[in-house]
Image: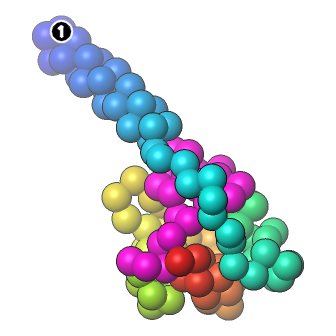
Amino acid sequence: MKFSRSLLLGLALMTTGIFVGCSSAPKDTNVTLVDQESNAYKTLYQQNCAGCHGQNLEGRSGPNLQHIGKKLDVAGVTKQITNGGPGMPAFGDKLDQGQISELAAWIAKQK
C-alpha cells in the first residue's frame, strides 16, 4: 500500500514536471525557418514531429528545434530521429532511411 501511494505520487510529480517544463520553453518569435517552400519534408514533419516539436519547431512537449542546426549536424539529427533519446521515441522502425535523411537534412539547416 505504501509503495503504490509513493509510486502514484512520483508519477503525478513527474507528469506535472513534464508539462510545466516543456510548456515553458522560450519561444523565438523572430525565427525564419529555412526551405519552407520545399514540400518534401512537410508531410513527414507534420505527421511525425509537429505533435511534440510544434508547427514551427517552437517546441511543445518536445524541445524547441528552431536553431538545432547550431548544435547538431545532419548526422547528429539522423541519429536522434533513428534511435530516439531522452523522452523521444525512435523512428528508425517507423520511417525508412530516405524519409529520415530528408527530415534530418531539413532540420539540421535550422540555424
Mark 1: secondary structure: loop
In-front residue for pair 107/12: 107
Q: Quadrant of residue 50?
A: bottom right
Quarter of the rendering containing residue 46: bottom right
Closest to the observer: 91 or 110? 110
Q: Is residue 93 left or right of residue 26?
A: right
What is the residue that sits farthest to the top in this orientation?
A: 1
Q: Position of residue 60 (x, y in %)?
A: 56, 45
Along the horizontal axis of the image, is 84 left or right of 96? left
Give the vertical position of 63 relative to 73 (above or below): above
* Residue type at the position of mark 1: Met
Residue 17 visible in this rendered orientation of the protein: yes
67 or 49: nearer the viewer: 67
Query: Which residue is painted at 63% across and 53% down in the image?
Result: 29
| Residue ranking furthest to the left | 2
* Residue 1 at x, y percent in the picture: 18, 9
What is the chief secondary structure element of the magenta stretch? Answer: loop
Q: Where's residue 22, x and y in %? A: 45, 41
Is 54 magenta? The answer is yes
Please give the residue where the numbered disc 1 appears in the rendered image: 1
**In the image, is residue 62 part of the stretch drawn in magenta?**
yes
Instruction: Indicate how the structure is coloured in the image.
Output: rainbow
Residue at image point 29% right, 18% down: 8
> Magenta span covers which residues?
49-71
